[in-house]
Amino acid sequence: MIMLRRHAVRHHGSPQATPLVLVHGFGCDQTMWHHVVPALARDFHVVTLDLAGAGAADPAAWDAQRYSRLEGYAEDLVSLLHELGLRDPVLVGHSVSAMIVAHAQVMAPELVGRLVMVGPSPRYVDEGDYVGGFTAPQVEELLASLSANYVAWSHAMAPVIAGNPDRPEVQGELAEAFCRMDPEIAEVFARTTFLSDARDVLPRVTAPTVILQCAEDVIAPREVGEYVARTIPDATLVLLRAPGHCPQLSDPEETVAVLRDHLLAGGVR
């Protein structure tokens, strides 16, 4: 099973339960979900994986040109779903992977049952009436800083992205995750993330979708979550109490409770 090995796929819980495929965001790997997996595995067949260039994914599979586009990651996910052979899986994408799972669902709607987007943003740069949260110069400054010294960037940006200023353990865990990624790969993935524009994909998503919008999220502010909810034809916006951009770290209990509430009752509400 080539894709299963390539992406270091791990299974948790009963194979007979509803499949829940967790896809991590930029600078992270599947360990980003470790606070929520044990609880979710009681009710779901949880599948975790490492995207190309992350964690224990096969380094030989990394290709800078292929992964300069979100579609490269989405194509991998579609191939992986073919190998897994899951029935109506729920794809849960965090941050940029919210758009990766959207691309995958549009590419292969027959392989996907439902979507959950955690802190999604189809475009980080403001444009016209669209509010992405960043100006173009701000994004270029962020990318230049990352390119100059990735480790320093990681330690400086992790507290901003994680939020929760009174909880250094949350910020520290995100910084450690960032620092595990190869800086050259991180630079490519960062450009793919912050310069992408997936707004045209959203109206083509046909799966029922739940959007988890965090409080005080500077990376994907509420205006962005509301835009995503308006643009996907069958979408439900859920406002979380958890602050920051990583609710699976800052409030795993709320994250698990919301997923159970919206996925175990026989459909997305």
Image (cartoon, grey):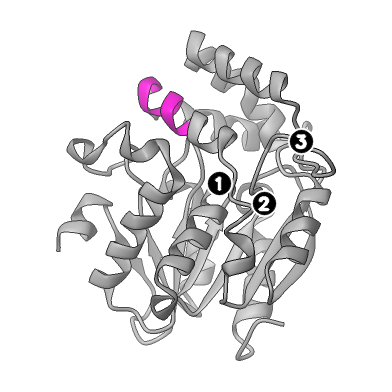
Residue 162 seen: yes
First in sequence, mark 1 or 2: give its number: 1
Residue beneath disc 3? 126
Residue beneath disc 2? 119
Residues packed near mark 3 inside 10 Å, few (<14), some (14 to 19) or many (20 plus): few
Residues packed near mark 1 inside 10 Å, few (<14), some (14 to 19) or many (20 plus): many
Residue 187 position in % (x across, y down): 45, 24
Q: Secondary structure at mark 2?
A: loop
At x 17%, y 37%, the residue is 60
Residues packed near mark 2 inside 10 Å, few (<14), some (14 to 19) or many (20 plus): many
Q: Are marks 3 and 2 in contact (CB under 8 Å)?
A: no
First in sequence, mark 3 or 1: give its number: 1
Q: Amino acid at mark 1?
A: Val
Image quarter for residue 77? bottom left
Majority secondary structure of the magenta segment? helix
At x 71%, y 38%, the residue is 219
| Residue 33 versus residue 53 in the image, above or below | below
Residue 128 position in % (x across, y down): 81, 39
Cα–Cα gap, marks 3 and 1? 16 Å
| Residue 184 versus residue 77 in the image, above or below | above
Q: Secondary structure at mark 3?
A: loop
Residue beneath disc 1? 96
Q: Amino acid at mark 2?
A: Gly
Q: Amino acid at mark 3?
A: Asp
| Quadrant including the C terminus | bottom right
Cα–Cα gap, marks 3 and 2? 17 Å
- Magenta-drawn segment: 183-189
Image quarter for residue 230? bottom right
| Residue 6 is inside the magenta segment | no
| Residue 73 versus residue 111 in the image, above or below | above
| Quadrant including the N terminus | bottom left
